Every structure is written in C-alpha cells, then in structure tokens.
Image (tube, helix red, strand yellow):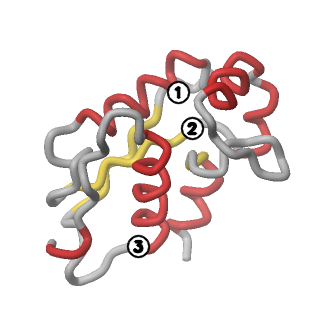
Amino acid sequence: VGDSMLPCPPSGCLLSWLIQAGLAFRAGPTPEGFRATIVSIGNDAGDLDSLVSSIAISDWQPVGGCGRELLWVPVAPFPRSDFRLRQDACLLFRHLGFSFDEVGSPESLLHLDDVDATTTR
C-alpha cells in the first residue's frame, strides 16, 4: 500500500482529494497500489443530491476515503458533456471553486464516460 495511500483531506480540501482519487483511478492497478476500487455512482438521473451523496460517501469511508487498501471513487452517472445541463450542480461546483473543462464539467469529477475509457484500456 505504502506510497499509493491518499491522505485524509483536511476540512475544506475536497477538491484536492477528488483530484487525487481521480488520478489514482486513472493510473489503474499497480503492485503497491490499492487492493480494490469501489466506484460510487448515484442514481441514473444524476441530480444534485445524487452527485453530492456519491462524493460524500466516497470521501467519508474510513478506509477508502483516507486511502488504506480500498480506493473509493465518486463518479457522475452520465457523460461528461451532460454536466453543463445540470445548472444547479454547475452553480454549486463553481461556488466551491472547481475548475471546469471545455465541455462545461468539473475537471476533477469523474464521469461515466471517463470510467468506460479507463476500464477498457
């Protein structure tokens, strides 16, 4: 496990934790890495409470959220390009200081198409 551990984020560091979790997920399995990855996806609608719950449960996990043997990763249950259609989520994520990519999605939040691309390589 060693170097692959994600540090427990101090209060207010959700953004850096999401970035670290996403990078660890995209890197894929390594011999010294996580034993397993658990993807936390809200309901199919992907409404704001579902997105927030997915992030919260992943961050809250006493093992996965703080990075021991399980990597918990929140994932938006829709394509990255659809995030901009959820104006309430856009407003909240902008208010929290997230950077947005060229398609109008928070750069650090994984989406269903990111997971598909990562798991098929």
Q: Earlier in the sequence, mark 2 or mark 3?
A: 3
Q: Earlier in the sequence, mark 2 or mark 1?
A: 1
Label 2, secondary structure: give it: strand
- In the displayed structure, 73 sits above or below 22; it is above
> Residue 113: x percent and y percent?
65, 53
- In the displayed structure, 2 sits above or below 91; it is below
Q: CA distance from mark 2 to mark 1?
A: 6 Å
Q: Residue at x 62, y 36 (%)?
A: 97
The residue nearer to you, when weighing 121 against 71, is 71
Residue indicated by mark 3: 28
Q: The residue under label 3 is which amino acid type?
A: Gly
Q: The residue under label 2 is which amino acid type?
A: Ala
Q: Earlier in the sequence, mark 3 or mark 1?
A: 3
The C terminus: image quadrant: bottom right
- Would you identify the image quadrant in which residue 61 lies? top left
- Would you identify the image quadrant in which residue 80 lies? top right
Q: CA distance from mark 3 to mark 1?
A: 23 Å
